[in-house]
Image (cartoon, grey):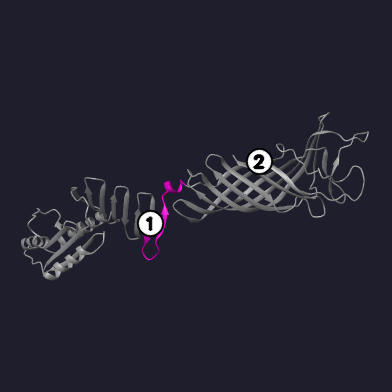
Amino acid sequence: MKNLLLMTCLLVSQGLWAKNTNDSLLLKIDKRDQKIIGAKADSKKTLREELEGVFEKKGLVLTDSLWQQIRTVIKTDSDGDSSISVRIGNSSVKIGILKSGVNYKSEIRTKAKPGGVTIESTGKDEVRVGWNGIHVKDGKEEVHVDWNGVHVKEPNGEETKVIWGRDSTKTQSKDKKSNLYERKGFNVYIGLNGLTGKMPENVIAIYPSPYLNSDPELKPLGSRFVSLDFTHAATIARGKKSAFKLGYGFSFDWYNFMFDHNRVVTKATSATNFQPILDTRGDEVALKKNKLTVSYITLPIVPHVVFNKQSAIKMIGLGGYVSYRLDSWTKTIEEKSDDLARIGSNFNLNQVRYGVKAEVALRHVGELFFNYDLAPLFQKGMGPELTAFSFGFKL
């Protein structure tokens, strides 16, 4: 690309000088071989002798000071290209000193157009010079210079923008961005939930007892967690292979606690307890379904790191959430009669729920999540000290 830019500058400069001077000299020197590029090679002549011969044909003299400048640039330990511009009398001299190992044999064609000049090569290179700026293409690499600044597009998709008077900014092309995992949009989370904690001590020997140590026991596969999530992600920092983002949004969550016994959550006068359903003879009624359902609207905040979609680990996130209870009810189905009962109440549940959330996306597994409530399920002193948790995967 540097070679193409230098050649462009030399060609543009040559066209501009031709308008202002009657004579100009444009030379290119191979830095490694120390030969004039494009001239008839003569192994017996040194570089200075070749330069002197070209100067003489133009009626010019190669001065010692100019020769020393050329020698200094050639000896400079640099892989880049350099140029020297001088004026001798009414003639302008431009000398490009190009690094070694470059093929300069491609044919250059210049076309004049109303909007400017297009300089094309027989390969994949192209240079356009016009009122909208200078555009240089070298294969998949492109450089555009205009009144706003410089825009460089590299073969790997990375773009660099230098705006006049402002700091440089680097972005990635859409194709490059799309290679990173995205945690956003509408998502459905489904999994299982559980309860942890301790039951109050029984101080009064009555039947049926308001609490038993077995009351928090759930049916593992029947206790389900469902969440409809709408989320977006803001990029905090981005690298070539990863990015740090902040996920935010809202969701509708449902806890379905399917109890593995016949004692139903009941709101009593003083507190919420567990009570069985009794028949006319005072015996407990067997239940084939006994659950407590609580629905919430939730605001999750999940800082996370995303990686390439082809990575073994595509995303890791750790954050928190706060929820507001929308509704809650119990549902029971008797085993013998199939009688169904649905009772809606707040059951002295905490109106606000909050906790921590962890997520990980694995290439061959999918996205997994784990939620742990830090707030107890029931209000303090108004029910058992139980805390809910859930885990599962994103569909």
Q: Quadrant of residue 16?
A: bottom left
Q: Residue at x 26, y 61 (%)?
A: 78
Q: Which residues are magenta?
A: 159-179
Q: What is the crowding at mark 1: few (fewer than 14 residues within 10 Å), some, or many (at least 20)?
A: some
Residue type of the residue flagged with mark 1 = Thr
Residue corresponding to mark 2: 191
Q: Position of residue 184 (x, y in %)?
A: 55, 47
Residue 16 in sight in this render? no
Mark nearest the camera among 2 and 1 is: 2
Q: Is 39 drawn above or below residue 22 in the view shown?
A: above
Residue beneath label 1, please? 160
Is 265 situated left or right of 137 in this image? right
Report x, y in % for residue 70.
Answer: 17, 65
Q: Earlier in the sequence, mark 2 or mark 1?
A: 1
Badge 1 marks a residue whose secondary structure is strand
Whether residue 289 can be seen here: yes
Find the distance from the CA under tag 2 to the CA under tag 1.
44 Å
Give the class, few, some or many, for how many residues have Cα within 10 Å of label 2's Cα (few <14, many ≥20): some
Residue at 19% from the left image edge and 65% from the top image edge: 84
**Is 387 colored magenta in this rendering?**
no
Q: Where residue 312 sits in the image (x, y, percent)?
A: 51, 44
